Amino acid sequence: MSKINTSESLMESSLATAQSSRSIPASFGLLKELQSAGGLRAIDVQFGLFIYQQQCRASRDQDNSVHELAEHIGVLACLLSYEFGLGHICIDVNKVSIHEMLSLKYWLKIHSKWSDKYATTLMQWQQLDWKAICLKSDLVANANGSTAQPLVLDGDRVYMTRYWHYEMKVAAGFLQRAKPVLYSSDKKQAMRNTLDRLFAREYSYLWMALSQIDLDNIQDRRRAMCESLDVEITDNLNWTEIDNALASARCVNDLALLDSLVPMSACLNWQKVAAAVALTRQFSVISGGPGTGKTTTVAKLLAALVTQSQDEATTPIIKLVAPTGKAAARLTESIGLAIDQLPVDPNIKAKMPRQSSTIHKLLGARANTVQLKHNRLNPLHVDILVVDEASMVDLPMMHRLLDALPKHARLILLGDKDQLASVEAGAILGDICSLSQTEYQAEYAKQLIDITGFQSFQSSTKSNDIADSLCMLRKSYRFHARSGIGKLAKAINEGDVAQVSATWLQGFNDIHLHPLIAPNLQTPQELETAQAELLGLMVEGYRPYCETIRLIKSALSQFHAEQAQADLFADIDVEPLSKAQMEEKAKQVLKAFSQTRLLCAVREGEHGVEGMNRAIEHALTQKKHISPKPGELWYEGRPIMISHNDSALGLHNGDIGICLSDLSEEDPRSRVYFEMPDGRIKGVLPSRVPQHETAFAMTIHKSQGSEFAHTVLLLPPKMNRILTRELIYTGVTRAKSRLDLFANPHVLAQGVSIKTLRTSGLSEKLNQIVRD
């Protein structure tokens, strides 16, 4: 978490001062007990005590009312710090009740004795006018006045001052770029022609759909056509001729007859709409679930932008970024494939970016300093910036990005609003997308009709510039009708517990539920069976990766044998692998390892990352797939994940590496190989690798930005406050082809029912500023 703008030593000093100068306020007795039990962090209580002390110093009078005010504002600061640690940017003073704060309520529930011990304190907190307390305090600034205080009251929300500034500047930054650009008729027609070429109908989806239904059923045929071609307006269609065309088609090319029977005006392709929105605004957001075609859409959009710039005799500087190295590497791979498939001139493709980087690298992060190379005084050299996996971008990072972006530059955010929010504070993408609607402002709706050819846009006086900048992709091209992963993800995302339970019973072959029993109801034999089943899956899942390692080890053994023979016969010349060959072998291992992954909801315990990493490592050792030596950390094939950024090495939190012998050296040493965001392979000596952990298992949080052909998802058998709809949805949607879920069905249902809501004022600020 980002540190509060107060050093720990200063807070420790404040605690000592508070204890020596006067007794600790009564309210802090409850807070300290919550801290001891793990309900609060030490920094939360210390920050509250620090604010308490500062309030006492700021007040000249030292009567009881002053101490009472200081105590209350200190408690509020403690709760604000705690909520900040959970990702909230602020707290609403109208909701500051110990019983209304979900997480603290959870702790009080398991320690019910506290409710009796501190009943009076709890009752007083619920009856306090927290807004009036803020208005009286010298340490809480008013948002409309000076903000040179540690806290800010903005309406009914209390912020740490730094984060209030971040939120204000991010809101202003989005709004400055959200204004539409209205084009001439000629320009709109040129855009229409470009988008029609790029988003030409692909009848392969319709042909596949027709092959899976009874063609004698007219309603099924029509439904398949409408879904495949995104038909929205059906009233004026000539269904007799359409039915004949569908029934008589003998190959996919025969379906092209529908071009004349189903006009573009009757359809609504949201990918094309998203491209049109981004073409006509400096700021746009494209959000969609897995398989909805975000990368394909942005590739076509960039092709349209490059085409547009050619007409204007310019060449835009386009940058692609993602929050993590893994997400950037995946974007590099996927955007390259998407560009190759575009129906555009090779000269256009040559001007499109194929490599991405992390946001940190783009901004010029440097070792041993928090200062970035690029900011408003030294802006980025970019005309179009695309940010993938935008749900992972926290408030401070978005502020830094906007601060460094030139005023003329376009900003395009891609992501899935329903995934987990950023690890750090804020939920930028969710906040923005909460303003989404299907209607547009009247003048802008008319422009979209002209550019896309679709006639079903509706206008609304309730829309605004931010809402008009958003586009939600609603159709999944990855998960077909027989995909259990797609059905399950949809049910989870909608919070439909009954449908989640029903999905497992529908016979899908790509999803498998392995029920876990609550620990207190589980016999030792049942526990052993569940563990064996899980470990068996993981050993089988990692077998191809282990086999690839075995082949490399065989090559190493052969190399040593030939080297020994060369020593006996001087005329034999044994050459090690070239560096490029070694990197290619490392890439093969990394690719094989990336096919399967165990994702855990928690870090600690036997059902967490730490316990499962040990268990999988032991199981693979038992099967002789890996050979770790006692007392040695590094071994051939050890997978690791970086947990601490190292700008000097270009390695970042979440990057995956594999330890292998470097066969390009005459005396092979171990190196840890990473795939960099631009697709290159980099080998690092183990002694130089920054903080890391073994990566047979990883948390769901760490898996964001990644996809695995086979995902094994493990939830704790007892309810844990970390289990939410967004966490489970994110874990499920990491799976591309197969999902195995180990979970207690009751815990799964509870988790799906809990939707994460992060408190912030960003959505309201965007609306408020628009109205003003």
Image: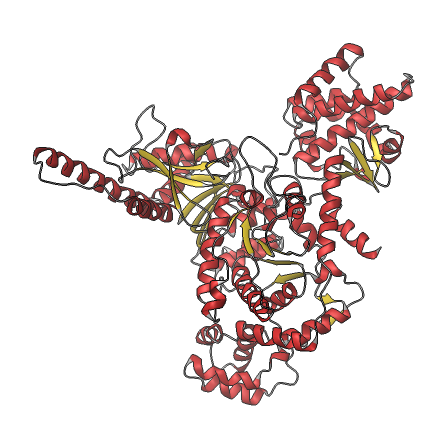
Q: Residue at x 52, y 79 (%)?
A: 221
Q: Quadrant of the N terminus?
A: top right
Q: Is residue 175 visible?
A: yes
Q: Is residue 454 visible?
A: no
Query: Which coloring applies here?
Result: secondary structure
Query: x%, y% of residue 309?
Result: 59, 66
Q: Is residue 37 left or right of residue 570?
A: right
Q: Is residue 767 left or right of residue 375?
A: right
Q: Residue furthest front?
A: 313
Q: Is residue 441 left or right of residue 424?
A: right
Query: x%, y% of residue 307?
Result: 56, 69
Q: Is residue 135 left or right of residue 176?
A: right
Q: How many marks?
A: 0
Q: Is residue 279 above or below residue 154?
A: below
Q: Is residue 524 above or below residue 250?
A: above
Q: Residue furthest top?
A: 20
Query: x%, y% of residue 18?
Result: 77, 15
Front-most of residues 239 and 439: 439
Front-most of residues 319 and 210: 319
Front-most of residues 512 and 608: 608
Q: Residue at x 55, y 46 (%)?
A: 362
Q: Is residue 560 above or below residue 210?
A: above
